Image (cartoon, grey):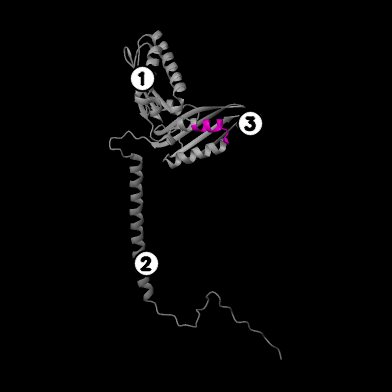
Amino acid sequence: MGQKVNPHGLRVGVIKDWDSRWFTTDKKEFGNLLLEDHNIRKFLKKRLYSAGMARIEIERSANKIKMDLHVAKPGVVIGRAGAGIEALKSELEKMTKKSVIVNIIEVRQTDKNAQLVAENIALAIERRVAFRRAMKQAIQRAMKSGAKGIKVSASGRLGGAEMARTEGYSEGNVPLQTLRADIDYGFAEADTTYGKIGIKVWICNGEVLPTRSGVNPREERRDNRRNDRRDNKRDNRRNDNRRNTRGNDNRGNRAPRPQGQRPQGAQGSRPQRTENKEN
């Protein structure tokens, strides 16, 4: 199951939160608001593609819409003296006919964000960079940034081949089935002369543990087991040393064997051969 579905959707309510947070009791209104959210995301993605849009969060109240935009380049969105963000607000208010509040949140580590990594690989392929080289470079940058694991997949007419295929590279640990694993997922498309190439990226940032003390109980059990094993090994060594000292004392009471003589029946001794000579 974890290999097929979107990792973010599989973990919503466990370690991930919803990107859209609102509710309505009217069923007809629900469909209209859902379509409006889709149009807002589509508009922002197209308008702010150069800024590196990683995530869009939408919250609604009666007549207000609050948006949190996670971008890699906040200066491109804000503009000079805030002119860019004011123009963006006015366009969104015309679209939704409601008051809009826009918050810009900077993405610190762009090499660990799956959506931005996928878009960078797609942009490199559009610039005629070899897809294998673009994928391997993205993997190296992500691992240097501190990611626990990364998996990249490219599908389409790779290298201008007549038949479409899928190739992928991975490094580190990416447990898609583990719900407590913080896995980020991103998808992007590269428009080439041969057609579209789809890029999928999975990045594992470790495990999220909802414990009060912040200690992983599994790791704690492992440490206890290791300590028990070490204590048992020490006790066994002490007992072996005691047995060896006792055995050495008993051996010391034996009389020393003279040199140059072998006991009868020892290994290496041969019986003497006798020959009968007739006169």
Instruction: Tell me the element at label 3.
Output: helix
- Could you classify mark 1 by the number of other residues whose Cα lies within 10 Å: few (under 14), some (14-19), or many (20 or more)? some
Left or right: 180 as drawn, with respect to 125: left
Q: Where residue 86 is drawn, which disc sits there? A: 1
**Which of 229 and 138 lies nearest the eye of the viewer?**
138
Q: Do the residues labelled 1 and 2 touch (CB within 8 Å)?
A: no
Q: Nearer the viewer, mark 1 or mark 2?
A: 1
Q: Furthest residue to the bottom? A: 279
Quote the CA–CA distance across marks 1 and 2: 85 Å
Instruction: Tell me the element at label 1.
Output: helix
**Which of 254 and 88 lies nearest the eye of the viewer?**
88
- Count all numbered tags in the image, as a single digit: 3
For marks 3 and 1 on the same chain, the one whose residue lies earlier in the sequence: 1
- Could you classify mark 3 by the number of other residues whose Cα lies within 10 Å: few (under 14), some (14-19), or many (20 or more)? few
- Could you classify mark 2 by the number of other residues whose Cα lies within 10 Å: few (under 14), some (14-19), or many (20 or more)? few
Q: In which quarter of the image is residue 165?
A: top right
**Which of 157 and 167 lies nearest the eye of the viewer?**
157
Where residue 42 appears, x then y in whole percent?
46, 19
- State the extent of the magenta-drawn residues as a range: 120-130
Magenta highlight on residue 123: yes
Q: Dominant secondary structure of the magenta stretch?
A: helix
Q: In this view, does 248 lie above or below 165?
A: below
Q: In this view, does 273 lie above or below 163?
A: below
Q: Quadrant of residue 233?
A: bottom left
Which amino acid, by three-letter code, is at mark 2?
A: Asn
For label 3, the residue is: 160
Which amino acid, by three-letter code, is at mark 1?
A: Glu
For label 2, the residue is: 244
